[in-house]
Each structure stands twice: as C-alpha cells, then as structure tokens.
Amino acid sequence: MYFTGRLFTTHSNTNVRLEHIFKIKPSQVILMSFISMIVLGTLLLMLPWSTTDHQGLHPVDALFVSTSASCVTGLTVVDVHNDLTFFGKVVMLLLIQVGGLGIMTLATLVAYSMGHRFQLQENIVLKESLNQEQQSGIVELIRCIIKYTLVIEGFFAVLLAVHFYPEFGADAIGYGIFHSISAFCNAGFDLFGNYDSLCRRNDDFFLMNCLAALIILGGIGFTVMGEIVNRRRWSRFSLHTKIVLTANVLLILIGTVLLMISEMGNPETIGNMELVKQLENTCFTSISCRTAGFNSFDLGAATQTSQMVMILLMFIGASPLSTGGGIKSTTFAIIVLSMLAVFRGRSEIVIFGRRITRQLRDQSFAIFTMGTFWVVAAGITLAIIDNEQNKFLEVVFETVSGFGTVGMGIGITKEWDIWGKLILSLTMLVGRVGIMTFMVALMEQKTTTIQYPPENIMIG
C-alpha cells in the first residue's frame, strides 16, 4: 500500500505542511526510521567524549554498536563498561530504549501529546509498525505500551538498584536503570565489563530471576500483557494470547531440558555446579537465548548439541509486538500446527476452538522461508570472509544471534573485519524490523485479477 501525504507534521500559524515528494510505503517508513536512528547513534558514538580514550569509536565499530543497540541485539565489539564514558553509556541506553519500543511508537506519543490529529495515511504507517490488523485504537495501544514499559522498567530498576547498592554504592542507581531497560528491551547489554555478561554472577539468583522476568515480560508482547492485566482469565484471552503463552512455556521448558541434558556433564559450563544451580542456569539460558542475550556460562565451551539448541531458540525469537526479534513464536507455532494438520490429513488448522486462516499460514511459511534463506546466505558469506578461522557452527551461531536480535556471542564478534561487521549489522537490522517488512519495503507489489489454470506437480 502506498501513500502520499504528511507524517507527524504540525499545524503552525501559517499552516505550513511538509508534503512528500515520493510515494513511500509504510514498510519503507518503518525501515527508514530505524536507519535514521542507527546513523544518529553512529555519529554520537564517534564523538571523542563517547569513549574513555577520548578518540571516539571507529566509524565501522560505531555503526556496529549503534545497530546492535538500536536493534536491541547485544552483540558488541567494545566493552561497554570499560570503553565507553558516561555519555557513551547514556547514548547506548537511549538507543536501546527507543529501539526496543520503536521510534514510530515514541514519535506518535510526542505528536499526540502536542495535540496532533492523525490522518489516514499516518494511521496506516502506525498500523504496520505495530503489526495490527485494524487502525482503530492505535493511539490508545501506544499509550498502554508506554505505561507498561515505564511501570515495569521502573519497578525492576528499583529492585536491582537496592540489590546492587552494597556492591556499587550510589552507582547502583545507574546499574539498576541500565540493566532493567536492557533486559526488558531484550538487548542483553551489561555494565559488568570484560565481556563476561553474568558468567561471574551465575550464583546470584535474585539478579538472574529479575532479569528473566524482565526478558519474559518484554518478549511476550504488549497486547498479551494488556490482556493478562485486563481480562485475567484464560477463557477470556484471545487466540493470539493463548498461542503466545503456550508457545513460550513450551519453548522455555523444552530448552531447559535439552540444555540441562547436554551440559550437566560439561565441567567447563555447569558440570561442577549443584543440581539446583544447574537448573537455574539452564532455565535462564533457555529464556535469554530466545532474544535477550545475557549468558551465565561460557557459550564457547558449550557442547555442539547445546549450541544447536540455542540456534533454534534464537531463530524462533520472541512474540509479535514485543521488544524482541526472530521469526516470532506465533509464526513457529503456526508452522508446527500446519505440519500436524497435514500429517493428520486435515485441510484446516484448528486450535483452542478457533481456525487459523490460510492467509496467516501462507505468511508464516513465507516468513520462515525468507528468514532461513537470509540466515543461510549471511552465514555462508561470513564463513567465506572468516576463511575457516572459526568453526562453521560458531559462524552460524553468530549469524542467527544477530538475526534473532539476541546478542549471544561465543567470543568471535570482535574478530570480524569491516565486511563481517557490516553484514552482521544488516542482519541485525533485518531481524529487528522483521524480514517480511524488510522485503516488502524493497520489492514492488502489484495486484492482478488474472487467474491462470492450475496444474499439479510432484512434491515430497
């Protein structure tokens, strides 16, 4: 769908209006908003007062870090704690917050607060940016998103600040705010330094449980959060909420069990821990590797089985209208349900007494296929650039981590050259805006009423 018109323009005394010269699709507006934010973040991180050496980040490194923060990924080529100044950390935090909520969401709130009345074209952009079917109630949804975000991040920021106070003193306030926003936005950045994430704090159950709760709340999506608050009973939940909650519980449980089986005998990860601590760390990893990126043990030392499990979880990612990436849990659920329907000889997908439309099924398979193609193409390209310096599974792990905006690294992020960082940066952008939105923004769409005669081909 194309539009020509205003985008968040205000009426001045002279009634000046900014008119678009070109026809721009809503998906292109969404893509350009993220690109603009990344460019701004890159310029700020290149400033001398962004880094402790007063040199500023190298342009490519600044672009990579800005993309990672804006796309709430967590992959980094700098030590946030040791390499960035207070100014640099604030820039990172703002990029994470705006990237997590979406720049269109915040722009809408500002425009609405200034009394702006949204036109049809603007509502179309907002509808696509929030992945909604209807245009009605968009502004109210955005207000709820901001309200839930402020309440949840504020509550856990206080809890974490109190928890950090004995160790960091007055700096605990900053630590609490940063990690609360980073976890809720599923970014995975931390201020503990030395690229260790939570490896030296994997016995701090209070911290890990707070971060896990933030990751889950940020990953289930704001519509689901709203239904839990307002409807409260399972019977009153929409089909979307039921599928999201069911899929998330199953993925967390399956991931925990598989990681536990794979790592309980590995002394380099959790093998030397007590059983309760093993369970805590594998459950946290199962939650985090869906889209957050915090890690409580050395992922590079994990077994190949565990790395494959984490790759699958990262590829699936979070849920729609959340702060996470990936193909989304609902997309994966529909694909699984479609396969079960085919195996049972059924033409329709029925779950919880409701039927999934053919259009949703086609879109799910398209997203899955396009996501797979992108990951494979980017992984092969990175493997060629890497020139077999690292194992192919490690390269794939890094690629899927970027696509799923997870940010879990196994220690090779800093080794990429300029081209490797640029490819990963593009992969993170695609994962954040969504592979469907990205492809629609680039391709021309045409509708036709012509129907061709069908003919069968052999498959399988």
Image: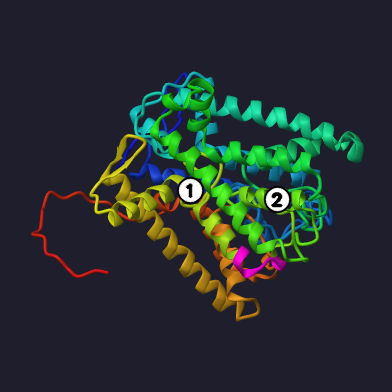
| Quadrant of the snapshot with the C terminus | bottom left
Q: Which secondary structure, mark 1? A: helix
Q: Disc 2 residue type?
A: Leu
Q: Nearer the viewer, residue 48 or 69?
A: 69
Disc 1: which residue: 433
Q: Nearer the viewer, residue 317 or 251?
A: 251
* Label 1, label 2: how far apart the Cα atoms are: 34 Å
Q: Is residue 9 left or right of residue 58?
A: left
Query: What residue appears at the point 80 percent right and 37 percent down from the top-left corner?
Result: 174
Q: From the viewer's perspective, is residue 453 above or below residue 23?
A: below
Res 440 seen here: no
Tell me the colour scheme of the image.
Answer: rainbow
Q: Is residue 313 left or right of residue 27?
A: right
Q: Which residues make up the magenta segment?
A: 300-306
Q: Is residue 321 magenta?
A: no
Q: Which secondary structure, mark 2? A: helix
Query: What residue appears at the point 32 percent right and 34 percent down from the top-left corner?
Result: 353
Q: Position of residue 148 (x, y in %)?
A: 59, 27
Q: Position of residue 232 (x, y in %)?
A: 51, 23
Label count reads 2
Q: Which tag, 1 or 2, sits closer to the chain's start?
A: 2
Closer to the eye: label 1 or 2: 2
Query: What residue appears at the point 40 percent right and 45 percent down from the top-left corner?
Result: 27
Disc 2: which residue: 279
Q: Are marks 1 and 2 in contact (CB under 8 Å)?
A: no
| Quadrant of the snapshot with the N terminus | top left
Q: Disc 1 residue type?
A: Val
Query: What residue appears at the point 69 percent right and 45 percent down from the top-left corner?
Result: 92
- Badge 2 local density, few (<14 within 10 Å), some, or many (20+)? some
Q: Position of residue 448 (x, y in %)?
A: 16, 50
Q: From the viewer's perspective, is residue 382 above or below residue 202?
A: below
Res 169 seen here: yes
